[in-house]
Image (spheres, rainbow, N blue to C red):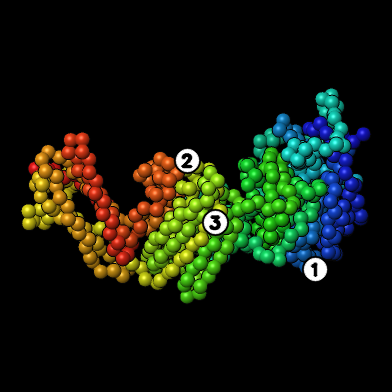
Amino acid sequence: MRTTPRSSRRRVGPVVALIASTSLVAAGLAVTSSAAQAEPDAPSVGPCPAPFPASSLENGLEAVGLTTAGRYAKDGETRDSSTTPETFTATYRGTVEDSTGDLYVFDLEGSRITKSDGTVDAGVWSGISGSPIYADGQLIGTVSYTFIEGTTNSAGVTPAADLYELRDRVVGSPVDTLRVSRAEQTQLRKAGASAAVSGDAATLKRIQAPQVVGGLGALGSRASTFAQKIAARSGHKAAPLAVGGSSRAGGPTEIVPGGNVAFADSYGAISYYSVGTASAVCDDTVLAYGHPNNFAPATESMHAASAVGIQSAAGVGSFKMANLGAPVGTQIADGLNGVLGRVGGVPEGTVVTTTTNGVRPRTSRSTVPNPDALSSVVASQMATDLVVSADRYAGGEATASWTINYVADGTTGSLSRSNRYSDADYLPDAVGNDVASDAQTLQGQAFADVKITSITVTTKPTSDYRAYRFGKIKVKSQGTWRTLAYDEDLDEYAVSLPSGRYFKVRVRLEPRSAKAKVERTYTEYTLRAPSGPAEAYLSIRGGVQDYWYDDEDFEDFEEFEDGLSELPGADTFAGVLEALRTQLRNDQVGLSYTTLQGRKRTTKTVTRSVGAVVSGDAFFVAEIG
């Protein structure tokens, strides 16, 4: 009777035949060593390989693992495991016991893990997570953890039984299972821990599946910083470890044990994804990683991938570089012992289409299965398109128009807006702010269940940097112009106005900097003071939020606002839409004049377009006398 610790059941499946450590054939999968490479056969549909019994684990037991390391040179020959897995050797050293799940400890050799003389090469790299290890035709488990920071060839292996528990719980328990009593589990634990490794399991370090963003290559050295800024603003998951490739039609579509598997928040022109290794392909499901990815609700698409190589990076260890393939399925679980995907239907996502009409017109398209990534994707895609279309990463001006199509509580609708952007040095950083913020506001409001189905954006850039800032503000009353002054006692700006008389307010608009190609100008308003006892308040502001232009420290960047606290009338979904549609544009100056007479409150608003972006604000109280 085969039994396994830490699980009350096992799955009986086809045996994995081990052939002289150079070729492994299992359930229609062809796997070669690095000495010879063969094309993989089409994988057959079947149950998971049988789990290796813990009672058979002995110190020094040698097993065979499968992984991909891309194309590399070793021992005077070029090896290629871009999509077809290659073998490595795994030697059992003991078991780390923990109440949340035991880990087997193996020393790994071969592939890019070690050099030919046995010394560590790339070691246990990020992206090797999920690599299966077999002995006697059975699955021992998957490479998932390390015990120290830095490069090592020692790995913690998640037992196959724990990996299968995730699938059985999500998909449904198989018919051919075997119950194991508590006494038997205790006995088996002792047998499996005969060479136990002492230590605190809390020191274990999950082998990070590389978090990758593809499609930002045009941003050059600023790509990683830009991705971090956008991720931080939008509340998206941690910034990517590496910049990788976007998904392309015609890429790999087959997922095999030991081969690459990726789970994506988005794919297409901008791809946010993690990449690791498939542990087992069971019927129409794929088990991977042997540890959580995001430890979050399953919202991602599943993809095959092609490994480019293993990159060693100072400070972060080694990681796999890989290009994302086309979507082949859906993530259905992200749990403690692994990630589970189903081959077949691909999740519906928001389609983001951006067109940029610069010197090199460009149209890009991404699909976003994970709603939390939508604002990151649209901002990143607009930035990349602008760089490629304008053929430079620099300052300038651009106008953008966009439409967000959605379904709210079963009813279709759309939101359309436009805006102008200008930046002295880094225009691409600015253009996606409002589209991303609108998307996040619609998704985050509390008045309707909203699914955004598509976003389309058209951007028109120019090379000129044109921007105003507020200069002096003057008020003309009874024929005399006076500069608005700050009242220390009132802690605000104040002005005295005669009762019932007309007065003028003039805002001087000056070039924001020496680089700004605008001439000094004015915007002027004629208003009337209320008659009799009254209070009057006046606010004036430009459309630009200054942090887009002045704050270059990513850690201080504000997140995209959900907008509700600043959207007047936004106490219904219709109110949110109206508030978004009527927001002040960056190239407008907005004036709001409120008078209070007894219980009567009157507000007058005036919006002026000034032909260039403008920043500044002023608020003052009028003393009526």
Q: Secondary structure at mark 1?
A: strand
Q: Residue furthest bottom?
A: 359
Q: Are marks 2 and 3 in contact (CB under 8 Å)?
A: no
Q: Label 1 amino acid?
A: Glu
Q: Secondary structure at mark 2?
A: loop
**Residue 619 rendering spot, x and y as whole percentages:** 23, 47
Q: Residue at x 79, y 60 (%)?
A: 84
Q: Residues within 10 Å of mark 2 (few under 14, many from 20)?
A: some
Q: Residue furthest front?
A: 411
Foreground disc of the pair 1, 3: 3
Q: Is residue 225 something one can see in this rendering?
A: no
Q: Is residue 393 something one can see in this rendering?
A: yes
Q: Label 3 amino acid?
A: Ser
- Residue 447, numbered label: 2
**Residue 273 rendering spot, x and y as whole percentages:** 63, 54
Q: Secondary structure at mark 3?
A: strand
**Residue 144 rendering spot, x and y as whole percentages:** 72, 45
- The N terminus sits in image quarter: top right
- Residue 77, numbered label: 1
Separation of residues labelled 1 and 3 (CA atoms): 48 Å
- The C terminus sits in image quarter: top left
With 209 as the anchor, is 549 left or right in this view?
Answer: left
Which one is earlier in the sequence, the residue at label 2 or at label 1? 1
Q: Residue at x 87, y 52 (%)?
A: 27
Separation of residues labelled 2 and 1 (CA atoms): 63 Å
- Residue 454, numbered label: 3
Q: Label 2 amino acid?
A: Phe
Q: Residues within 10 Å of mark 3 (few under 14, many from 20)?
A: some
Q: Nearer the viewer, residue 34 or 50?
A: 50
